[in-house]
Image (cartoon, rainbow, N blue to C red):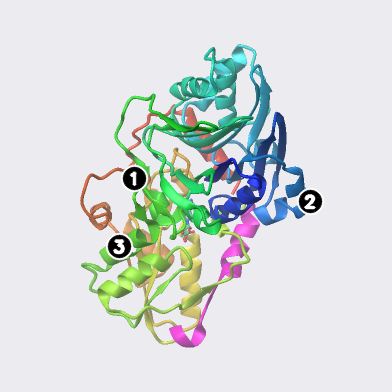
Amino acid sequence: MCGIFGIYNHKDAANITYLGLYALQHRGQESAGIACFDENTVHLHKQMGLVSDVFTADVLKTLQGTNAIGHVRYSTAGSSDLKNSQPIVVEYLKGHLALAHNGNLTNARIIRDDLRDSGSIFQTTTDTEVIVHLIARSKERNTADRLTGALNTIEGSYSLVLLTPNELIAARDPYGIRPLCLGRLKDSHIISSESCAFDLIEAEFLREIEPGEILVINEKGTHSLFPFKKVPRKHCIFEYIYFARPDSFMFGRTVYTIRKAFGRGLAKGDTVEADMVIPIPDSGIGAAIGYSQASGIPFELGLIRNHYVGRTFIEPEPSIRHFGVKLKHNAIHDLVKGKKLVVIDDSIVRATTSRKIISMLRYYGAREIHFRVSSPPTKYPCFYGIDTPSRKQLIASSHTVEDIKTYMQCDSLRYLTVEEMKDALDGGDYTFCDACFTGDYFIPFPRAMDMEQMELFSRQ
Ligand code: AMP
């Protein structure tokens, strides 16, 4: 769960990157960083914290140069500390190089062990550093070919930006799991995880980087390579459900329209009678609007979110997570009192947030609570870059819908089915990875990965 950004040929490259990272902040709140080149001198600033905490006007002044890349991070591999923050900047035989990555490499541990056995020294515990080592060891002459060689060795998901003194290179894995797009601001080319960053800086959206594409941007213009074997597209469905910003255009559609379609799908075939539909903000809003429009049940903002608290799920300490639920949502008492409610959220992970919200609504006098989830039960962890807990902690992996309903203490519970989700995406080929719902892991991973994932989540 990370956001990446890159810009080539702009006199305020670092400032634009800073703005871009603001728009991508929802993709990672642990650390932020920018690297840029001023001729052959590299400047790097990265720190733990939000973009607004990490960069000051004085810091941005030091980030000179016309090309820059940036990164916001939430760890899915490697621990959450400064040494693992990105961009990673290294000096090797061919000079300096900066790299920022969004995704998760499934064979990183194996490659890392091999490299270490042959003498490599690692500075971080991220999977991203493996790519840098492979680039440095490559015998190819230019950076794009070195990168191709490295990417041919790794498996898993990656959208990445790589910067050298004279080139910005963007790459997306052959399945196109994580998003990445290309924009233009006058004479500058821009790469971003999501198109919402282009809107902020008034850049033009050109297109999405294709799955398996390596795009080289330099003084000659842009040049695309497609060096990998073609495989079916497997875009992450969870980007649509939860992770991406609703105003982004991604995998060929606007995220908000998909969220509404999931809500409409949920309403179809639902016979519940209620006074109002209320979303759990912000993640349930799009689906609740769709549900309301399809069912004719009025939409109300029955729950108000305090935006100054981070996403509860993402807080690293268990104590903060616990308080976070109460800090984050409150109900409008008069509105919900005595009412039959349809309450909508995009997903249930551990069911702790939803359970507490239901209990709060009851406390304020709600008469009936019908909980609706605009995605299928999340039963399997993601190994391709979304931060989901191990199976043990995913309530739907070991409990029936009826059990979950009892645990949450709602009057009824309904999830969108996998079939309804596919229908809502309306026609054409189904080009999504839905392993979190189906367990269909199309990229094999070593068993050890399971353990790592468990370890990662035992921190929470
Ligand atoms: P819970 O009720 O505790 O299962 O939490 C569900 C909430 O977590 C929903 O509002 C989701 O939007 C949110 N959520 C789902 N997946 C994630 C994730 N990977 N990271 C952070 N929050 C998530």
Main SS, magenta residues: helix
- Observer-side mark, 2 or 1, equals 2
Amino acid type shown at disc 3 = Ala
What residue do we see at 60% from left, 60% from top?
Answer: 310
Q: Secondary structure at mark 1?
A: loop
Residue span colored magenta: 316-336
User: 183 or 409, which is in the foreground?
Assistant: 183
Q: Is residue 349 visible?
A: no
What numbered label is drawn on residue 261?
3
Amino acid type shown at disc 1 = Asp
Q: Is residue 318 visible?
A: yes
Image location (x, y in percent) of residue 417: 27, 56
Q: Secondary structure at mark 3?
A: helix
Q: Secondary structure at mark 2?
A: helix
> Mark 2 or 1 closer to N-term?
2
326 left or right, relative to 409: right
- Is 228 within the magenta? no
Instruction: Classify 337 as above or below 14.
Output: below
- Between marks 1 and 3, how big is the CA–CA gap? 17 Å
- Between marks 2 and 1, how big is the CA–CA gap? 44 Å
What residue do we see at 61% from left, 17% from top?
Answer: 116
285 left or right, relative to 233: right
Q: Quadrant of residue 4?
A: top right
359 left or right, relative to 163: left
